[in-house]
Image (tube, rainbow, N blue to C red):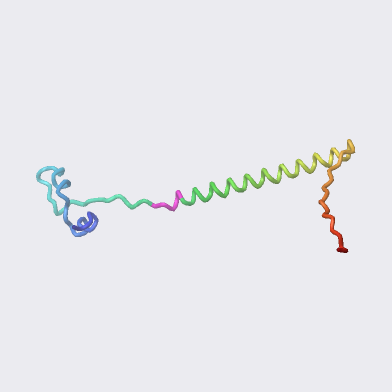
Amino acid sequence: MHPPEDQLRAGHLPADLVRRMPPGTDLRKVVIVQEAPRNYTGPILLTITVVIGAVVVLLVVAFTVQIIAASVVAVLSATCGVGVTLNRAKSKRSLIK
């Protein structure tokens, strides 16, 4: 069995199409128009654009929150004397055993 595309290219008309044609139609002059295969380029590019846009928005929000937090700490330390210190834990090692 041949796929329908091969049959149509060879000029063979499927039986269901022949039955739907009006009587007296010259089958040698019938042109069958097929729908073009679906193109997936548009949806793929749209998905990539949405993902990149979401990543950019998240980065902008993260940088904005970081800047706001740094400015709040700077204002509080300048006005109220409140400071933030980071202490690294020191491990006690004895050099002499």
Q: What residue is rendered at 39% in x and 52% in y? A: 39
Viewer-proximal residue among 7 and 34: 7
Query: Does residue 37 appear to the left or right of 2 in the view shown?
Result: right
Query: Does residue 19 appear to the left or right of 53 in the view shown?
Result: left
* Position of residue 5 measured from the top left corner of the image (x, y, whole percent): 24, 56
Q: In the orientation shown, which residue stands out farthest toward the left?
A: 24
* Position of residue 71 measured from the top left corner of the image (x, y, whole percent): 80, 41
Viewer-proximal residue among 32 and 75: 75
Q: What residue is rendered at 63% in x and 45% in y? A: 58
The span picked out in magenta is 39-43
Q: What residue is rendered at 79% in x and 43% in y? A: 70
Q: Is residue 49 magenta?
A: no
Q: In the orientation shown, which residue stands out farthest toward the top?
A: 80
Q: Main secondary structure of the magenta part?
A: helix
Image height check: is 71 above or below 90?
Answer: above
* Position of residue 96 measured from the top left corner of the image (x, y, whole percent): 88, 63
Picture quadrant of residue 20: top left
